[in-house]
Amino acid sequence: MSEQVMAATPHAVLAADGTPLKQRLQKTLRRRKLIAAGLVLPLGVFVFVTFLFPIFLMLFRSVDNPIIHENMPQTVAILEQWDGKGVPEEAAYAALVRDMVEARKNKTIGRVATRMNFEMSGVRSLITSSARKAKKMQPPFKDALIKANPIWGERDIWVTFKRLGNEYTATQYLAAVDMRYDSDNNIVQQDEDRQIYVTIFGRTLWISLAVTLLCLVLGYPVAYLLATLPAKYSNLLMIMVLLPFWTSLLVRTTSWIVLLQTNGVINELLVWLHVVADEDRLQMMYNQTGTVIAMTHILLPFMILPLFSVMKTIPPSYMRAALSLGANPVRAFVKVYAPQTVPGIGAGSLLVFILSVGYYITPALVGGRTGQMISNFIAFHMQKSLNWGLAAALGGLLLVGVMVLYWAYTKIVGVDNMKLG
Amino acid sequence: MSDSNDPLVRFQEVQKSYDGETLVVKNLNLDVARGEFLTMLGPSGSGKTTCLMMLAGFEPATHGEITLDGKSINDVAPHKRGIGMVFQNYALFPHMTVFENLAFPLQVRGMNKAEMETKVKRALDMVQLGDFGNRRPAQLSGGQQQRVAVARALVFDPELVLMDEPLGALDKQLREQMQYEIKHIHESLGVTVVYVTHDQSEALTMSSRVAVFNDGVIQQIAPPDELYEQPENAFVAQFIGENNKLEGIIKEKNGSGCVVEIPGGGVVSALDVNAGNVGERSSLSLRPERVEINPEDGKYPNIFNGKVEELIYLGDHIRTRINVCGRDDFIIKVPNASGLTQLVEGSPVKIGWALEDCRALDA
Ligand SMILES: Nc1ncnc2c1ncn2[C@@H]1O[C@H](COP(=O)(O)OP(=O)(O)OP(=O)(O)O)[C@@H](O)[C@H]1O
Ligand SMILES: [Mg+2]
C-alpha cells in the first residue's frame, strides 16, 4: 500500500510552507524524542554504571591474564624466544631468579605462585620456597635452581610459564568446559578426576528444566482458576500466590529444610504412619530432590503471574463458543483455550528457566553435594578459591547460554507474543 | 426438520437467581415455534442474556423446565444440545483461520474431509466470504467477522440458533445491512432463531415475534406491528417507539372505552385496554403520528387547544413540541408535505385524535 503511494509520487511531498513533509515531521518529532531520551537517561546511566559495565569487566577478567606478565617481565620476555624444546638456556634461569627476587621484594610472588598453581596443582609452595632461596643463589642459576628444586629441570613448568606469560588467555574458558592445554599446547580433555564443570552445567540445565516443567504443571491450573473464578475467591487465591513474595527467601528455604530433612516433619509423619521404616527414611534434602522442590516452590509465582495475565485476557465466550459448537469440555480446552495461552506458557517458562539457571541461595542451602548448581561454583571461585578468572569464564558461558536461549525463543514464539505482566 | 406444530423451545415457569436473593428471571413461560424469528427485547439488565444462557446450557435454571423439541434439556450438557450460537464479541478462535473456525464444529462431529470442505465452502458463500477462508479473524473487518460468526453457528445445520446482540459492535449502516442479511438467511434456511437485542428498531424489522422483557418478566409478546400499535401496558407503550404519555384518573367506563380526567388538562376519551376501575389512576398512550392538526370540529372526541413550544426540523417531518393537556412535552409529528399549515413557535394550535388511537393502560 505505502509502496504504491511512494511509486505514484516520485517527488517528495511538500508541507504547506514548501519544506519537504518528511523534514517537517522530523522537526516536530524531535522535541518529543528529546524528552523521551531525557526521561530514560537516569535509568540508562544507572544500568550502565551498575550493570553493563561490571558485566563487561567480569567478562574481560575471564580472558585477562596479567599476573605472570606483570610480575615476571624479564622471564616472560626471554621465554618468548624459546622454542619450547627441552629446557630453556641459562639466560631464562637468570631472568627467573632476578624476577623472583624482585617479586619477593614487592610481595607479589604469592600471586604468581597461586596463578601457576591453578594450572599445575602443587607447584605453589615449590615456587615460593625457590623464591625464598633465590636471593642467595649464585650463577650458574640453572644448576642452582634445579638444586633448589628438581622441577626446574623439567620442561612442563617452563611450557606453563611461557603460556601464562601471555597477556590474554583462553585457559579459563577451557577450564570451564573441563579442557586444558597439554605440555605441547594442544587442547585436550582434563584428567578424568578433575572433570567437573560439564557435569555441573548439565545438572544445572536438568534441574532448571525440571523446575520449569514442575512450575508449569503446578502453576497452570492455579492461573486458570485465578483468571476464571469470581473476584471474591480469585482475590484470596491471588494473595496466597503472592504471599511467598512477602516472606524472606531464607525463611522459606529453611522451612523446607524443617519439612524435608531426614528427621523433618514429613519423614516423622511417614514413619509414624508406618509408610516407611525408621531406618530407611526418605532422603529429600541435601540432594537434587531438595533443590528441585524448594526452587519450584520459590519460582512458582513467576510462572503463575504471566500465565494469569494472558488467561485474564481470554474472554469466557471462547470456551462457550467451542461448547456450543459441539466440542466436549476437554476438547474445547485443548483446541481452543490452551493454544491461546501459549504466549503465557512461553513467557513464564522462559522467566522461570532463566531464573533457575542462575539460582544460588536455595541450592547452596538445601542442595547438599549433588544438588549444587553452576552458580554455587561461581560463588566458590569468587569467595573461596579466589580464582576470579575461572568464575568469570563460568559466568560468561552461562550468560551466552541464556542469550542463545532467549534468541531461540524470540525466533520461535516472537517477542511481541510474549506477555510478562 | 419435523413439521409438527409443537413448539421447538418451551420455557415452563422458569426462574433464575444468581445470588439466591433476587430473581433475575421471574416465572418465564415462553414458546418458540419452529422456523420462527423470536426476538427478546428489553432494557439493559432485564434478563435477556440470562434466558439465552439457560437455553444454551451455560447457566442452570433455578426453577422450572426448558424443553427442546419436546425433550427436557435441563440436564443436557451444552455441547450435546446442538444449538448454534452467535456471541456479541463473535468469539471467533483467533489462532485458527476462518476455514478452520468453520470446520471446527464439523470436525468434532467426525465428518470426513471432503464433505467438510463442501459444507464450509457453502457456508462461506452464503455470507459472501468465499475467498476469505485462509485469513485469520484479526485480518477481517468487524462486519466480516460478524458474518463468519453467523456462518459458523449455521454450518453444522442446527435447528436452533441463538444470537446475543450480534450487531452491537457494528456501526449503524453496517448494522442495517447485516439485519437484512441475517433475516434473509433465516428465511432461506428456515432455521429457528432466538435473537437478543436492546435496539427496538432492530427487533421490529427482523422478527416474526418480539418478546419485550422488563425486570425479568415478559411484558408482552406479539408480532412487531401489534406490539407497536396495540401495546398492552404502559412499559411496552413507552419502550417501543415514540409515545405521548398522559396520566389521569378514570372517571367513567363504557364498554370498550373509558373517560380519563387529566389533572389540569381536561377530559380524554380513550380505548380501555387494561385500565383499572373507576377512580383509579391510568396512563394513556398516544403515538405522535396519530395526532391531527386543525381537525374539523366534531371529527374526534378529543380536541384540544395548545401552544407550539418548539419545532425541530428532521427533513421528512417536523417534530413539534406542544404545550397541551397540562404538559409541555407533548410531541406530534408534522409531515413535511406541501400544502400543510406552517406552524410557528409560540402560536396557538388546535389538535385532535381518535378514541381508538389513545389507549388507556395501567398506571
Ligand atoms: N454471572 C452473573 N452473576 C451474577 N449476576 C448476574 C450474572 N449475569 C447477569 N447477572 C445479573 O442478572 C441481571 C440480568 O442480566 P442479563 O445479562 O441477563 O441482562 P441483559 O438483559 O442481557 O442486559 P444487557 O442488555 O445489558 O445485555 C442483571 O441485573 C445482572 O447484573
Ligand atoms: Mg445481555
Image (cartoon, rainbow, N blue to C red):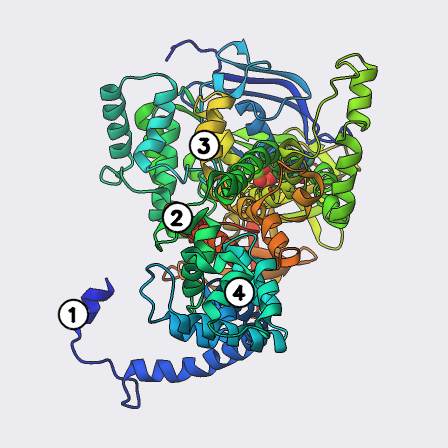
| Residue A394: % across, % down | 51, 53
Q: Residue at x 36, y 32 (%)?
A: B101
Q: CA distance from mark 4 to mark 3?
A: 47 Å
Amino acid beneath label 4 = Met
- Residue B183 is marked as none
Q: Residue at x 39, y 36 (%)?
A: B149
> Which chain letter matches label 3?
A
Packing grade of label 2 (10 A; few <14, some 14-19, many >=20) is few
Q: Secondary structure at mark 3?
A: helix
Q: Earlier in the sequence, mark 2 or mark 1?
A: 1
Q: Earlier in the sequence, mark 1 or mark 3?
A: 1
> Which residue is the site of mark 2?
A408
- Against A403, residue B7 (above or below) is above
Q: CA distance from mark 4 to mark 1?
A: 52 Å
Q: Earlier in the sequence, mark 4 or mark 3?
A: 4
> Which residue is the site of mark 4?
A58
- Residue A336 is marked as 3
Amino acid beneath label 3 = Val
